[in-house]
Amino acid sequence: MTSLAERAAELRALLHRYGHEYYVLDAPSVPDAEYDRLFRELDALETAHPELRTADTPTQRVGGKTLPEFTQVRHDVPMLSIRTETDSGPGGAENFDAKVRRDLGLAADAPAIAYAAELKFDGLAISLRYEAGVLVRAATRGDGETGEDVTQNIRTIGQIPLRLAGVTAPVLEVRGEVYMRRDDFDTLNARQRERGEKTFVNPRNAAAGAVRQLDPRIAAQRPLSFFAYGLGQVEGWALPGSHSAMLDALVTMGIPVCADRAIAEGAAGLVAFHTAIAAKRDSLPFDIDGVVYKVDDRALQAQLGFVSREPRWAVAHKYPAQEMLTTVESIDVQVGRTGAITPVARLAPVFVGGVTVTNATLHNIDRIRQLDIRVGDTVIVRRAGDVIPEVVDVVLERRPVVAEAVDLLSPPREVPKYQPFEMPAACPVCGSHVAREEGEAAYRCTGGLVCSAQRKQALLHFASRRAMDIEGLGDKLVEQLVDVGLVRTPADFYKLGIVKLAELERMAEKSAANLLAGIDKSRSTTLARFIYALGIRNVGETTAKDLARHFGKLDALMDAATLDDQPASLAALQAVPDVGPVVAQSIRDFLQESHNREVVEQLRAAGVRWDEFEPSENLATGPLLGKTLVITGTLPNLSRDEAKVLIEAAGGKASGSVSKKTDYLVAGEEAGSKLAKAQELGVPILDEAGLLALLSPAATTET
Ligand code: IVH
């Protein structure tokens, strides 16, 4: 029995360590499979001998029951809040420093005060109570005096240690913020949308909802994170002399503390911190609403004390809000690169996330219907990180109404002044018919190259590096060429002359000559590049290569795509590996358009040539023959392009999106939603080394 107990303790210690490496340090020292193996061993041991199950066992992170309601928790040391500086410019930092110096009675020439400067995380405050080093209770702040016991849900946060490293003090209450990372928030919302469930307005709401979720199994599916920023009740642990040293001590115990913190000397130090964080706010992986300054020295903190339940030694210095209310003046649609028609809200100008916003994307008609956004509505606009401003919610109570008579006897009733939004039937740019394909969220203009909004984009795509690779043909130039009428179709590039080109604004004779040389060079290309350059919807580089490999000649492809017998034509296209009904239909649609076929003929006439071959000449071989791989994240040594070349050289295909047909996902650092999707679909996941092993199977065949 003793040896079983010892083994259980050993397993718990290992799992705590590996868990910390994985969740907090982002540097696992063992593969996930090893963690899983130890976890299963401990779980089996505990099932056979329930008396071995301790409060801090990692097997119990998820496993609580649904609660009827939360138990109230009294905070022995109240959870206070802090004052906010109203001036969000440098003046805010200067005010605080001046006030602290005055409260301490310091002379003007006394040395600068050292402050602990931190981020103000936008989540919710949580107290974690450790007794003898073991997490025994987690509680929300509530009104500061009484909160709610949310231990079951907080246990599911992998970053929060169930046992502190090296501390067995009778009581150590750690306080901090539970939050949701932006990427986790996006993934969560995408999942909610897919399941037809309600989406969350922002990461803070999503985090708060998860923490206060009565069913811990649901809470466990909401990806939460945690940063500590202080302590509550402490017994039997000697507090370090400064706030920053206390946070350092928490780090050694395995508690996550944000690395973006600093000791700032005096007002100048605070201003510098505020400015530096403002500059990186957008690129942080989570939302912050400001920074927090705390007098670092504990003795000085004690001297300053509190005023009306707020410490005099701490202050919040905010940044411009990332969410604001404004009104919808109109709803327009924009035509994108592929003809996708996106509804856009024109807004009363509002300062949000540091910029004045007048437009916000509404994504698609489903999103509009879901939120029921109408002209005249008051809406919440969010701009966080580098993302385009979005309308995330409608304040329905503020919807404008008009009185409508019912009949002569009843009083008039109030009805919304504006009707629900409808997609236009015709493209606002070219007037072509607008269509929505089955299973697609977007509506599209069917005008193709007739539509000038799409034409410029199509021309740019044609000239791009991975397509015809025409050097020197950027977006400004394409814009000019189209606007002055020199270029209408890709074939027109090959008819340009030096005289006309040199007449363009900002175009010297020399650069005109260089451009013509670039155009000339692109005349000789590969069939795959040429097919890709045509910009057929749903035909990316990989599909273009497949088509080239399968058909060998452009005419063979055109013949297959334009057969009178539609089912036979689609079947011929679907004979190409990985071409399904949707892609086949796009290819047929494109090549059946006579104006698209004309462009191809004009290009041929202008001397554009590509390699052609008998399809059988090019049958691929290699260890990845017939396999589809997706690369995501940053690999340690290979660039994405290099990895792609290796995969293709081994007969495999590198695709852009994960599906059931994906054979492997190659994941590097910062792999996001594709990794989550692959895990969901059970697609095997490789790292760079795993990929290289697949490429040279000889080296790994030993067993
Ligand atoms: S210190 C006595 N530090 O902001 C000081 N609070 O009113 C207690 N917050 O809801 C708070 N980041 O949850 C502190 N680095 C940080 C913080 C922070 C976010 C939240 C906290 C509370 C509010 C303070």
Image (cartoon, rainbow, N blue to C red):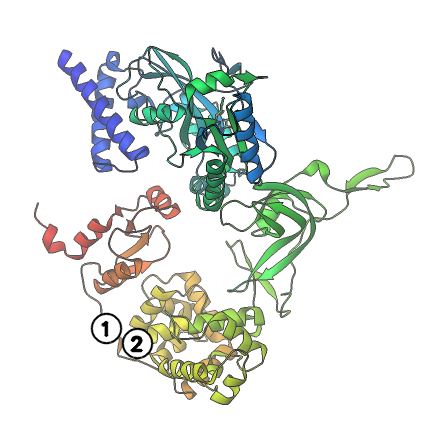
Reading the image, the residue beneath label 2 is 552
Q: Is residue 332 visible?
A: yes
User: Which residue is rendered at x = 45% and y = 32% of the image?
Assistant: 117
Who is closer to the viewer here, 219 or 105? 105
Who is closer to the viewer here, 108 or 639? 108
Asked whether mark 1 lies closer than 8 Å to ligand 1, one says no
Q: Is residue 628 above or below residue 213?
A: below
Who is closer to the viewer here, 583 or 531? 531
Q: Amino acid at mark 2?
A: Gly
Q: Is residue 148 visible?
A: no
User: Which residue is rendered at x = 77% and y = 45% of the image?
Assistant: 417
Q: Is residue 450 above or below residue 393?
A: below
Q: Is residue 482 left or right of residue 245?
A: right
Few, some or many residues within 10 Å of mark 2 (<14, 14–19, 20+): many
Reading the image, the residue beneath label 1 is 618
Count all numbered tags in the image, as a single digit.
2
Q: Quadrant of residue 8?
A: top left
Label pair 2/1, CB-CB below 8 angstroms: yes
Identify the secondary structure beneath mark 1. helix
Q: How far across and how far down the image is residue 579, in percent? A: 37, 63
Q: Which quadrant of the figure contains the C terminus? A: top left
Distance from Cα at disc 2 to Cα at disc 1: 8 Å
User: Which residue is rendered at x = 27% and y = 46% of the image?
Assistant: 685
Q: Amino acid at mark 1?
A: Asn
Mark with earlier residue (2, 1): 2
Q: Name the residue furthest right.
A: 408
Q: How far across and how far down the image is residue 2, in percent? A: 14, 11
Q: Which quadrant of the figure contains the N terminus? A: top left
Q: How far across and how far down the image is residue 138, in percent? A: 42, 19
